[in-house]
Amino acid sequence: MRHDDPDIRPLTEDDDYPRWVRALGAGFLRSSEVGEEEFEVRRGGIDPDRTLGAFDGDRCVATFRTLPQRLTVPGGASVASCAVTNVTVTATHRRRGLLTRMMTRALAEGKERGEVCSTLDSAEYPIYGRFGYGPAAWTTEWEVDVHRAGLDRRRPAPEDEGARIDLADGAEVRAEGAALHERVRALPDRQGMVDRGERWWRLYTGELDWPGSGWTRPFHVLHRDASGQVQGLATYTADEHWEHNAPHANLRVRDLIAATPEAERDLWHHLLSVDWVATVHTGGRAPDDLLPQLLPDARAARIRTHTDFLWLRPLDVPALLEARSYPVSASLVLDLRDPMGLAGGRFLLDASPEGASCSPTTRSADLAMGVDALGSLYLGDESASRLRALGRLAEERPGAAALADVLLRTARRPWCPDEF
């Protein structure tokens, strides 16, 4: 280490916190001036043991933080993930290895804590592959032309006899929405979803806020079935816009989760039937979301964004592969390369619909790949055959890539609705 290299360490002193938050603002090209209320709210979400800063003298020049996270995997189980967030390096200190040093330390600590993978939302595509991450879930946003959609806006939703949709306030959403989300996250085809703690819901509903945050009070609606159980939640904002003396408002969906297809259909119908609304912006949805095909004219939903979103990096391969479900019985030997020395090796996966076992082996490999490729395959979105064609995976036994596709791919695509 050069004598002038910044010191990377957890936040240990009172002065560390404001310096770290100011560096975070500067790194994200926001104001480095932080008001007292914002600072107090942000500090409440910072675990100093999981928060690293690079300090050059009395100035913080890089930030890095991890969160304990539960990630839903195929089949509905969840695993402990080391979620990476708040990664910045100040422009004056780039190209000095600060991110590598922080990432190396954080992933080693995550593995030691028993977290079986690491997850993140990548702002820039080229950065994280070299640390063993692969894009594991994508997101798609549609813009719906309400007048073209073909729905009868005069028909009140929902269609199900006895079901209803009601406006809700923040307190009700914090109680009912949080319980709903946990039910939805545990469904067998919701791989990619992550848990939301109490603090998440307080920030989401504005109970925790600060001046200048940009948070706007939204509308919330809850869908209840005939028994009164909450089966869906939608949160949205709307702007008032007029053209030629006629309303052309934009409705922007912040969140829509549903435990049943019926609740999902009814919530979309409600959002597409709000008076004055001409365009509905869906926010990030699963790439195979039901919405377009719910419309009489599916072309009324135009894709505005389709991009990678959740990235995954294995830390404990046996525990990770044993946690998810598999549709058939089969065995694969995976030879994994790890540039950071955390999860590499040769592993035998014995999988079946009843469960799976995975352990180190000396058997000949069926497939060879980097841990980043396994990260892309794990949630069921990517194809081993496709990665083979891209040169990211080597087939050591004929037919092994096709077998991996049968074992690992899922009927519905993974989706993560949350930034973190």
Image (cartoon, grey):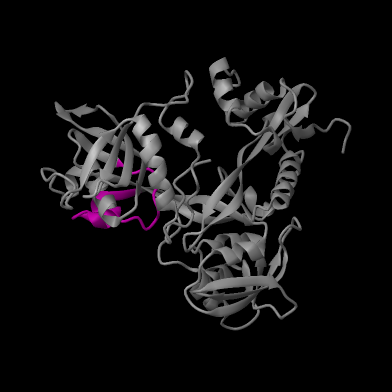
Instruction: Say whether residue 288 is magenta.
Output: yes
Residue at 56% x, 82% y is 399
Please determine whether, in this image, residue 311 is positioned above or below residue 36: below
Which quadrant holds the N terminus? top right
Instruction: Say whether residue 414 is magenta.
Output: no
Front-most of residues 378 and 396 = 378
Q: Quadrant of residue 355?
A: bottom right
Residue 323 at x, y percent in the picture = 57, 63
Front-most of residues 314 and 280 = 314
Asked whether residue 309 is in view, the answer is yes
Q: Which region of the structure is painted magenta?
A: 281-303
Residue 183 at x, y percent in the picture = 41, 51
Q: Residue furthest top?
A: 36
Please determine whether, in this image, residue 30 is positioned above or below residue 186: above
Q: Residue furthest left?
A: 154
Residue 207 at x, y percent in the picture = 43, 26
Residue 346 at x, y percent in the picture = 71, 71
Q: Residue furthest right?
A: 3
Please determine whether, in this image, residue 194 is positioned above or below residue 38: below
| Circle count | 0
Q: Residue furthest front?
A: 227
Q: Quadrant of residue 345?
A: bottom right
Residue at 38% x, 41% y is 177
